[in-house]
Image (cartoon, rainbow, N blue to C red):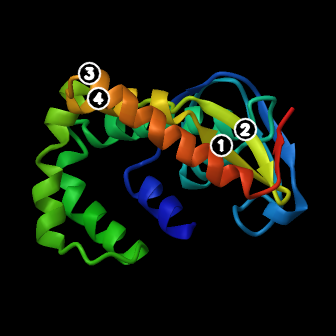
Amino acid sequence: MSGFKNVIDAIGGIDINVDKHLYYYDKYDAGEVDNDGLIDIKAGQQHMDGNTALEYVRFRHDPMGDIGRIGRQQKFANALLTAISTPGIIPQLPAIIRQIQNSFDTDIPITDMLKFSTLIPYMKSTGISTNMVDGTPVYINNISYWVPDIVKMRNQAAKLENIQVNQEYKEQSNILAQAYKKSLDDVKVIIAP
């Protein structure tokens, strides 16, 4: 977690328009972020340091639960892209990449990271495309899971990969969906409220 915070701090923080007040206390989160377990992020435009950004992407205690958290993480990814594609940050990329390398376990050489950084202007012009896989929230052995709709997921993947969805593809999707559903029959699944 400190690696995430260090990288966000190294780029000078990020700007995000927070949709609603995010407030929650969880004694089990104390020590994970520098907040003693309290997350309190006001609605509106916010400039976030690494700690606040970590609280933002981890927050899941609203009616949308994990689905809301995924949406915030997607929004964060776009805000991060905006932050790292500003002209002032480009000269700092080698130092930021070293911070990434020091903060995370990776086998990607720094030279490759620098090559990847040349894609940032292209990514900024095209943006980051995100999708949510349709599905159903369930509990299996008291653990929350998102069970995807296999047919819809394959259709989304086909669209992303520019694959023609013909009858054979649809039939294969249905076979896979039935096999997936059968595998769930072997475990105790409770549909989440």
Indicate the secondary structure of the residue bearing disc 1: strand
Kind of residue at badge 2? Pro
Alpha-carbon distance for marks 3 and 1? 27 Å
Q: Residues within 10 Å of mark 1 (few under 14, many from 20)?
A: some
Q: Position of residue 107 (x, y in %)?
A: 26, 78
Alpha-carbon distance for marks 1 and 2? 5 Å
Kind of residue at badge 4? Glu
Q: Is residue 157 visible?
A: yes
Residue underneath mark 4: 168
Of labels 4 and 2, earlier in sequence is: 2
Residue underneath mark 1: 146
Indicate the secondary structure of the residue bearing disc 4: helix
Alpha-carbon distance for marks 4 and 3? 6 Å
Q: Nearer the viewer, residue 125 or 147?
A: 147
- The quarter of the displayed image where residue 193 is located: top right
Q: Residue at x 41, y 73 (%)?
A: 104
The label on residue 137 is 2
